[in-house]
Amino acid sequence: MSDVSSVFLSLGAWNWLILAALFFALELAAPGIFLVWFGIAAAVVGGLALVFDFSWQLQLVLFAAISVVAVVAARKYLRMDDASPERPLLNRRAQQHVGRSYVVAEDISNGYGKVRVGDTLWRAEGPDVSAGARVRVTRTDGATLIVEPEKG
C-alpha cells in the first residue's frame, strides 16, 4: 500500500472533518453560498464515521447523498422571493422619486438643474424652470431625475 493511501485509511473519520474544514475555508474565499453545503455533508459523514464503523465506499455514498439533499434543500428553502419584496426600490434610490413633486433648488436651464429632495440636491433634467417652482419626477436616468413642471 502506498504512503498516501495508508495515511488516508489511517485517518478515517478525520479525513471528512479535515475536508469539511477545507470546504468551509474555501467558502470564505468564494462568493456566494455553495461550498458550505458540501462542508456540512463532510462534517456529518465525519461525525457518523467517528461513531459507526463505515467502509470508505459507504462514506462516499453518504457524502454524495447528504450533499445532494443539502444543496436541494438550500435552493428550495433559501430562495429569495423576488415576486413581492418588501422594499423593491431599496437599491434604486432615484426610482423611488418617480411620481413625487419637489422644489427646484437651482434653475433648470438648458435642460439641467437641481431639485431639493429632503436635505439633498439631486441633478434634474427637464424644461427650463426657475428656482422655487415645483416639478414632478416622471422617470429617471441613472441618478438623474427627469422632471416636468407641476401643473396647477
Image (spheres, grey):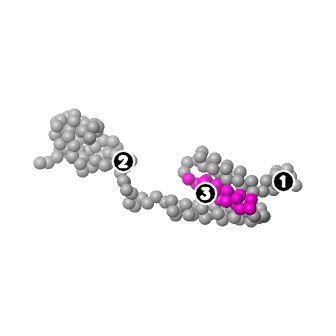
Judging depth in this view, the residue of 137 and 12 nearest the camera is 12
Q: Nearer the viewer, residue 95 or 140?
A: 95
Q: Residue at x 38, y 60 (%)?
A: 84
Span shown in magenta: 33-51
In the rendered image, which residue does mark 2 sit on?
A: 92
State the image coordinates of residue 86 (x, y, percent, origin top left): 37, 56
Q: x and y percent of residue 124 in the render? A: 26, 40
Q: Is residue 124 visible?
A: no
Q: Is residue 135 above or below residue 106?
A: below
Q: Which mark is residue 6?
A: 1
**Among the two numbered marks 2 and 1 on one chain, the one whose residue lies closer to the N terminus:** 1
Q: Which mark is residue 132?
A: none
Q: Amino acid at mark 1?
A: Ser
Which element carries disc 2, helix, strand or loop? Answer: loop
| Left or right: where 80 falls relative to 27 | left
Q: Secondary structure under badge 1?
A: helix
In the picture of the structure, the residue carrying the numbered disc 3 is 37
- Where does the image place residue 65, in percent across and percent down from the top left? 66, 65
Asked if residue 42 lies in the magenta stretch, the reply is yes
| Disc 2 from disc 3: Cα separation | 32 Å
Between disc 2 and disc 3, whose residue precedes? Answer: 3
- Crowd rating for badge 1 (residues with CA inside 10 Å; few <14, some 14–19, many 20+): few
Instruction: Report x, y in % for residue 89.
Output: 35, 51
| Figure quadrant of residue 112 | top left
Other residues around mark 2 within 10 Å, as few (<14) / some (14–19) / many (≥20): few
The amino acid pointed to by label 3 is: Trp
Q: Answer with mark 3 or mark 1, whichever residue precedes in sequence.
A: 1
Q: Residue at x 78, y 64 (%)?
A: 53
Whether the magenta-drawn stretch holds residue 140 is answered as no
The kind of secondary structure element at disc 3 is helix
